[in-house]
């Protein structure tokens, strides 16, 4: 049986795991069986990185990490990955900053990662590469004569040709994606955008959802990521009885709770969301003193000026809203910029009457699925969901909104707060069925089945 090799920008070492763990560590838990290798950056910045990865073993899984220099980190991570690719692929051209030297550094880091990874590969390994930091990795591995089956999953959106062509190095990036055997996306819209870009910018001929480039077949698949639903339901039930949820419930004094949980990022639509809650209180004064909004926005990428400006803007909006509407015994907005554990959040979701998930653009957004899973079926809350989150393709029974319109968000929260129990139950049952079907386990199984179906000879063309 072929060994699975997972590759990601950061490797979540076992010592870093715990109740706060999220992201790939949770999504790929079912793939982390004994014998698996996980390769990527250690998170350390050093003067002279080693040429071969450092190996750590835990529970039968080998974690292989490499370090970066400060210059590599600035060009690869801060400069190109998060200064150019992240805003571009989230449809925010005005925030994109392209510098050729950053792109050169991005490619150089991928080249060095490929060389380090090649030292620990076995001929029949299945290699599964994750996310926008590592688009050129397969191409660099091919240049080292690595003929393994290699798949790539993009966890963020993809843009149509009219936007991608703004990036000067777009054709080279598409060449990098075309070096993979399988390329996965959360939604059919993202996949279609990729295929259109490949057709227009690489000149390939499409055969439904695949094309041949440089003698190899590239298959584009839709594989929406999910959560471990059963485990999350149990966590939510248990956490809702715990001390933190009890403190929150007591502090509400019978008031309804609306909750939003995000990383502090301009793609999450946080200013519009908080403005919307203020509009709710202005346009529907019957909700004053009867609902509180809890926004958790864990700080991230604080070396980026765009994020510092966002934080200042949110501080201003929260201050204005609370200053305008607070009473001596009620504060409408509670705002936290530190991370809370997934278990704690599960309890908060369960007691929240409204879950507000309104990113301006998002690859999937698992908070939406976690909120649905956490609800009490006998008395469920209502999910307000952005039409531009990948999750909206599946969770159609949510109240779907345009996140660029604060008034529409306010109207949806108003509707959610007044929704009758029968309608809440019906919507929740349909959403819960979907969340139970589209799990993290299924995500891993579907992608790896596609990758395992590929041949390794002569040029990794899929059967």
Image (cartoon, helix red, strand yellow):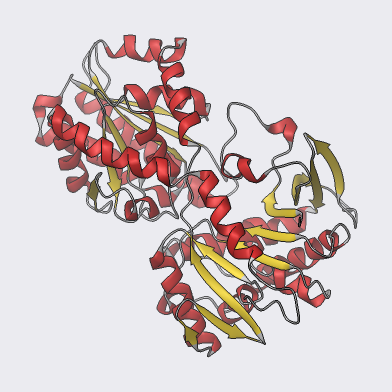
* Image vertical order of residue 209 relative to residue 235, above or below: below
Residue 278 place in picture, x, y as percent:
21, 35
Residue 187 place in picture, x, y as percent:
41, 61
Residue 337 visible at all: no
Q: Nearer the viewer, residue 357 or 128?
A: 128
Q: Nearer the viewer, residue 13 or 149?
A: 149
Rendered-image quadrant of the N terminus: bottom right
Rendered-image quadrant of the C terminus: bottom right
Residue at x 51% of width, y 81% of height: 198
Q: Is residue 104 left or right of residue 183?
A: right
Q: Nearer the viewer, residue 291 or 205?
A: 205
Residue at x 27% of width, y 20% of height: 331
Figure label count: 0
Q: Is residue 273 left or right of residue 177?
A: left
Q: Is residue 193 left or right of residue 40?
A: left
* Image vertical order of residue 315 relative to residue 343, above or below: below
Q: Nearer the viewer, residue 322 or 268?
A: 268
Residue at x 86% of width, y 44% of height: 55
Residue 5 visible at all: yes
Residue at x 20% of width, y 25% of height: 325
Q: Is residue 449 left or right of residue 373?
A: right
* Image vertical order of residue 210 relative to residue 108, above or below: below
| Residue 387: quarter of image | bottom left
Residue 66 place in picture, x, y as percent:
81, 51
Residue 33 place in picture, x, y as percent:
71, 42
């Amino acid at each position: 049986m072929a060994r699975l090799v997972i590759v990601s920008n950061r490797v979540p070492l076992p010592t870093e795991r715990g109740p706060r763990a999220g992201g790939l560590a949770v999504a790929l838990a079912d793939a982390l069986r004994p014998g698996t290798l996980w390769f990527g950056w250690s998170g350390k910045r050093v003067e002279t990185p080693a040429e071969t990865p450092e190996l750590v073993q835990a529970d039968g899984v080998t974690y292989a990490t490499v370090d970066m220099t400060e210059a590599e980190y600035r060009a690869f991570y801060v400069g190109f990955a998060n200064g150019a690719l992240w805003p571009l692929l989230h449809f925010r051209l005005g925030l994109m900053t392209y510098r050729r030297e950053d792109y050169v550094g991005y490619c150089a880091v991928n080249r060095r990662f490929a060389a380090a990874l090649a030292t620990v590969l076995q001929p029949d390994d299945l290699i599964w590469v994750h996310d926008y930091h590592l688009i050129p990795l397969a191409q660099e591995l091919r240049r080292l004569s690595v003929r393994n089956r290699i798949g790539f999953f993009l966890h963020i959106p993809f843009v149509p040709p009219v936007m991608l062509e703004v990036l000067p190095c777009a054709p080279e990036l598409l060449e990098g994606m075309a070096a993979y055997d399988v390329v996965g996306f959360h939604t059919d819209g993202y996949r279609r955008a990729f295929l259109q870009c490949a057709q227009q910018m690489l000149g390939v001929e499409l055969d439904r959802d695949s094309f041949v480039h440089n003698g190899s077949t590239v298959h584009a698949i839709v594989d929406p990521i999910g959560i471990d639903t059963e485990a999350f339901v149990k966590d939510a039930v248990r956490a809702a009885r715990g001390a933190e949820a009890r403190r929150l419930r007591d502090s509400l004094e019978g008031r309804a709770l609306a909750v939003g949980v995000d990383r502090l990022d301009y793609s999450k639509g946080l200013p519009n969301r908080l403005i919307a809650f203020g509009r709710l209180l202005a346009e529907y004064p019957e909700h004053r003193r009867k609902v509180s909004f809890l926004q958790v926005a864990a700080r991230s990428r604080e070396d980026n000026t765009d994020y510092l400006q966002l934080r200042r803007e949110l501080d201003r909006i929260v201050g204005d809203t609370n200053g305008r509407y607070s009473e001596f015994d009620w504060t409408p907005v509670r705002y936290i910029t530190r991370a809370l554990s997934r278990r704690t959040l599960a309890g908060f979701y369960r007691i929240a009457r409204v879950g507000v998930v309104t990113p301006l653009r998002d690859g999937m957004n698992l908070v939406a699925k976690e909120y649905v899973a956490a609800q009490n079926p006998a008395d469920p809350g209502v999910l307000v969901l952005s039409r531009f989150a990948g999750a909206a393709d599946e969770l159609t029974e949510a109240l779907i909104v345009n996140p660029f319109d604060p008034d529409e968000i306010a109207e949806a929260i108003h509707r959610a707060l007044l929704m009758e129990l029968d309608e809440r139950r019906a919507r929740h049952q349909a959403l819960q069925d979907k969340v139970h079907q589209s799990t993290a386990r299924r995500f891993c199984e579907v992608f790896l089945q596609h990758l395992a179906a590929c041949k390794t000879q002569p040029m990794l063309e899929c059967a």
